[in-house]
Image: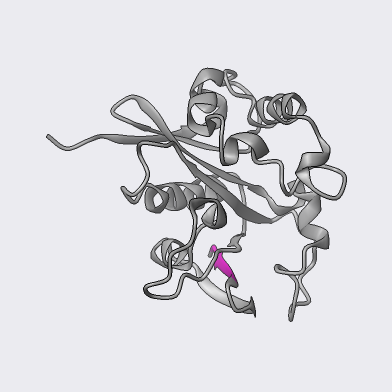
Amino acid sequence: MSEELVVVSANQAAPEDVDAIFGTTDAGHCRCQRFKVAGWIWRDTTEDERIARLYQQTACGDPGAPATSGLVAYLDGEPVGWVAVEPRTAYPKLRGTRVPWLGRAEDKDDPGVWAVTCFVVRKGFRGRGLTYPLARAAVEHARRGGARAVEAYPMVVPPGKHITWGETHVGVRQVFEEAGFTEVTHPFPRRVVMRLDFP
């Protein structure tokens, strides 16, 4: 029997489902605050602060919320994955990060461009290719939200090269290629900027 994958906006997910996905290690410590927190690094905040901020940003448990910061995937009813996607302007740290801007004259304050910044797949469910449907769902979520384009900043994984799960929280190039993104720039050997413009 095939497994059923359902992806919903995070405000439709219960807080305990989000907690189950993030867990207590890896992304569980950051809580998707890397590009959002003030200060030099996300560890300048406490874990309780980051958890509270994620709850606020997702509006999880509030289906009527006007906005959310990501999507939650369920596999046969079990919460298994997360993808962060919202207007690029929601990520203050992206403004000062070199990856998105090297070789580009892009308007950093353009609210019509959304960004996919993070994937989390729950331990025990990794290696099943769940980031692929999450990326496709992020595209559709951005489109429905009024985006005119959506960007991503994935890692390049050379054939035969092993990298840790934590390094690929931004996604890998192939995932975005299969979701319809094309490469815009290749600012560093291991990082690319990819984009999908909507008609």
Using the image, determine if residue 125 lies above or below residue 149.
Answer: above
Q: In the figure, is residue 116 to the left or right of 158?
A: right
Rendering coords of residue 73 (x, y %): 42, 35
The magenta segment: 192-198
Q: Quadrant of the N terminus?
A: top left
Left or right placement of residue 50 versus residue 95 in this view: left
> What secondary structure is the stretch in magenta mostly built from?
strand
Which residue is the extreme one toward the left?
Answer: 1
- Tell me if residue 109 can be seen: no
Residue 4, image quadrant = top left
Q: What residue is shown at x 55% (from left), y 63% (from top)?
A: 154
Colouring convention used in this rendered image of the protein: one colour
The answer to whether residue 150 is above or below residue 27 is below
Judge whether residue 197 is colored magenta: yes
Asked if residue 190 lies left or right of residue 129, the reply is: right
Magenta span has 94? no
Near-viewer residue (116 or 126): 126
Residue at image position (60%, 71%) is 191
Q: Above or below — where is 185 with respect to 27?
A: below
Q: Is residue 100 visible?
A: yes
Q: Residue at x 64, y 25 (%)?
A: 59
Image location (x, y in percent) of residue 10: 54, 31
Residue 2 at x, y percent in the picture? 16, 37
Q: At 56% from the left edge and 35% from the top edge, which residue is drawn? A: 25
